[in-house]
Amino acid sequence: MSESVSNELVRRVVTAALLIPIVLIAVFLGGWTFLTISAVAIVLMATEWEGVTGGGMLGRHALLNMFTGLIALSLLAIGSFEYVFAFVVAVSVASGILPRRDGSYSIWPCIGVIVVIVPAICLVWLRALDFGMIIIFWILLVLWATDSGAYFVGRMFGGRRLAPRISPGKTWAGFYGGTAAGVIIGVAIAAIIQDFSIFRTVLASIFLSLVGQCGDLAISALKRHFGVKDMGNIIPGHGGIIDRLDSLLFGAVAVGIIIFACGGILPLWL
């Protein structure tokens, strides 16, 4: 292992060791604690998104994204998910009508509102459900296992590149290793609960792992499009908040859609 890779690994491990307990405690406590950490994530991601996509770190679209996210989280505490989602979509459309400082228009602020805010409101809505804490723990641990499995297996075996034009460092070995790790952890978490279907748990874990890896590739494609290495630099060894949450942004929405379609009462593994 080269010195640069070793240093990167150390930074990743140390940062994860510091941040993961904070996130897990926030999920466990729920309520205003989880709402607050979601709000902080929205503010930071809105800044990163606008900085990378061309409007400036604190451009008008970044501020609009921040305030929309904070309002959406506040409304979610007193209103229904459907109305909050409709509000976010309406602001997303409006952000495309709002010109940037130079008078130009862009689709990226519209996409940014959805990417930054919708996953946050999905997670807050899920946490408020009777089984919400376990569901979010399951989402996080499956995605973290997928990310770690892909990283270590990919480094160990190398081989054919998964998407060389988008993310040259990702390999098919890492893809399979990450998916396997996600399934193992997903089944282990569900097994803690007395009533669970092994078949449905495996399918749900594979689905979440694949969605998470697609989210990772999507953000990588975005960074390559704009010619940047990371969305930000706030997290040592990981880049920005969006870099760290890329798989969660997509996974949270996917799980939220499934559970919402089931009436908000059905865990994925029953």
Image (tube, rainbow, N blue to C red):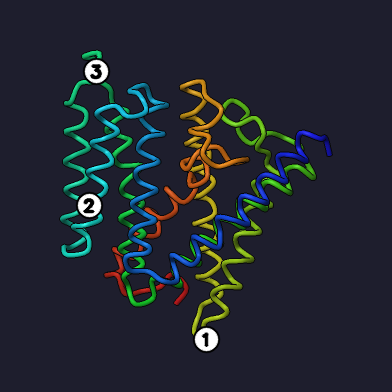
Q: Quadrant of the C terminus?
A: bottom left
Q: Quadrant of residue 125?
A: bottom left
Q: Nearer the viewer, residue 120 or 269?
A: 120
Q: Nearer the viewer, residue 72 or 106?
A: 72
Q: Which residue is mark 2?
A: 72
In the image, is 170 to the left or to the right of 31? right
Quote the CA–CA distance across marks 1 and 2: 35 Å
Answer few, some or many: residues within 10 Å of disc 1's Cα (few below 14, many 20 plus, some between 14 and 19): few
Of tags 3 and 1, which is closer to the observer? 3
Of the two numbered discs 2 and 3 on the same chain, state the one appearing first in sequence: 2
Of tags 1 and 2, which is closer to the observer? 2
Q: Position of residue 191 (x, y in %)?
A: 57, 78
Q: Are marks 3 and 1 in contact (CB under 8 Å)?
A: no
Residue positioned most to the bottom: 194
Looking at the rendered structure, the kind of residue marked 2 is Ala
Q: Secondary structure at mark 2?
A: helix
Q: Which residue is mark 1?
A: 194
Q: Secondary structure at mark 3?
A: loop
Indicate which disc residue 76 carries.
Answer: none
